[in-house]
Image: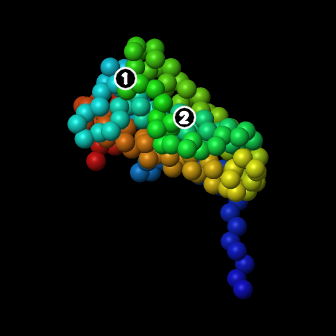
Amino acid sequence: MKPAHTVDPSVLAEELRRALRGHGQFVDPLRAVDALDWKLAGRTPPGFDHSALQLLAHMVYWQDRYLARLAGEDAPTPPHDAEGWPGPAAPSSEREWLDAVDAFRRGLAAADAAVGAAPLGDTGPTLAGKTRLGTLNGLALHNGYHAGQLAQLRKVLGAWPPPGGGDSW
């Protein structure tokens, strides 16, 4: 029997951090909201189910749940999908939009810190049988999926790429 291949935990940690911040074909989730006008953040063009604010609020909601689970807190999955889509479609002010972006930014920083907070192979009662690696990877994938939606939404709204550039396939 061939021995299992092992990967240096520091390599896994670095790959997780890259996944959380987008790399390669994935847009950095913060770039997806960078410098988006707060009025555009409330628009839902034809063919889209959610505004940028709704997508971001959804990302913050789930990011907070993942982080709570990693911290050992009970954060069960809600019984209905609608509970994971909190808040209004449009921000009432620029401050409301910027506060949502800041909440997301703080959560990403907390996720980055969580990568090194304990061994990635650890499991716990609040992780539903998953490892810390699996939980953080799930967070990165969730954010990556919705960051792609945000980039596409911004393209339709004429607000992509953000300042500083971005892929525009």
Q: Is residue 95 above or below residue 76?
A: above
Query: Mark 2 falls on what kind of element?
Result: helix
Which residue bears the numbered disc 1? 90
Q: Residue 83, position in %: x, y?
A: 51, 36
**How dense is the environment of label 1, judged by Cα within 10 Å: few (below 14), some, or many (20 and up)?**
many
The residue at 72%/86% (across/down) is 1
Quarter assignment of residue 36? top left
Q: Residue 75, position in %: x, y?
A: 66, 40
Q: Residue 144, position in %: x, y?
A: 47, 46
Which residue bears the numbered disc 2? 61
Q: Is residue 150 above or below residue 128?
A: above
Q: Is residue 138 left or right of residue 44?
A: right
Query: Mark 1 falls on what kind of element?
Result: loop
The residue at 51%/43% (across/down) is 80
The residue at 70%/74% (across/down) is 4
> What type is the residue that disc 2 sits on?
Tyr
